[in-house]
Image (cartoon, helix red, strand yellow):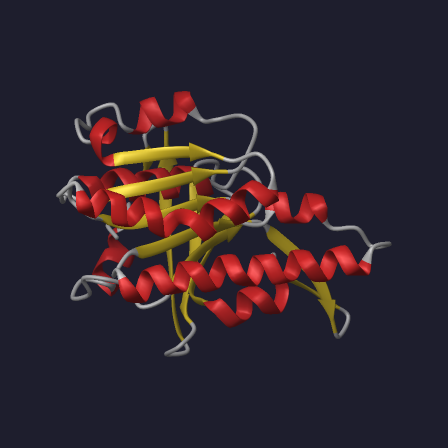
Amino acid sequence: MKFPTLELNKYFDSTDSLQGIFSVFGDFGVGKTTFSLQTAINSTKSGKSVIYIFTKPNFPYEKIMMISKFSKFIENNIQFIQILNFVELYRLIFNLEFLILDYLSQNKPKYNLIIIDSITNLYKLELNKDNKEKNYSLNYQLNQILANLTYFNKKYEIDVLIVNELNRKIIEDQIIEVQSGGKVMEFWVKYTLKIIKTEKLNERKFFFTNISLQNSVEFTSNLGEQGFL
């Protein structure tokens, strides 16, 4: 992946493909979609092809046009797919290998990056506190989605970036901010990037964690009309 922030690119400078799922999460309006779109567009500049799955009702046409204003790669190198319910997302990921193999059979540049923006918003809409059986099924499907993405990452060396929602829980009388998805996410995700707003209007603070190595990096970046600078 080619990130829009210098600090992350330095961290992964010697890595061709990330071993595991990379999760970006934060509150509404912090720039998660902007970050992931920039990552997609930056990745195409090095000849990579991207599958970008968008799971919200309002497709970000204007944001895509603004961020990709000076990019000639987006039209042919990014395949956008919009999904509007969790069952569709589950079925798409389960059948995504056929698309990957079909692309390879046509001697096209292979897909090197899958982005899901966002992975849990449709899942959370389906949850029902009065229907435990349905919730168990949803958790199973979310597990299967992440398992398949991990499989694509390992077998085809395809990077995986997921955009996630922010969840708040109370631990020992303290409010802790974590990504949505609970233990399912904790099991499958190998890298997390939390984005938060600061007191400066266009400034964002990033908290990156490599869970496997148990190390972290903090940095800031400014968010402008064409993305993070």
- Give the farthest residue toward the bottom: 213
As drawn, 56 above or below 167 = above
**Percent x, y of residue 106:** 16, 40
Horizontal side, residue 155 vs residue 206: left or right: left
**Percent x, y of residue 34:** 40, 37
Q: Residue at x 55, y 34 (%)?
A: 56
As drawn, 210 above or below 82 = below
Taking depth in this image into account, of 97 and 187 the one nearest to the observer is 97
Number of marks in picture:
0
Q: Residue at x 38, y 43 (%)?
A: 36
Kindly tell me whether residue 224 is visible in this rendering: yes
**Percent x, y of residue 74:** 24, 30
As drawn, 128 above or below 172 = above
Kindly tell me whether residue 18 is visible in this rendering: no
Taking depth in this image into account, of 25 and 130 the one nearest to the observer is 130
**Percent x, y of residue 53:** 43, 40
Residue 210 in which image quadrant: bottom left
Horizontal side, residue 93 vs residue 123: left or right: left
- Give the farthest residue toward the right: 130
Quadrant holding the C terminus? top left
Taking depth in this image into account, of 166 and 46 the one nearest to the observer is 46
Q: Residue at x 44, y 46 (%)?
A: 116
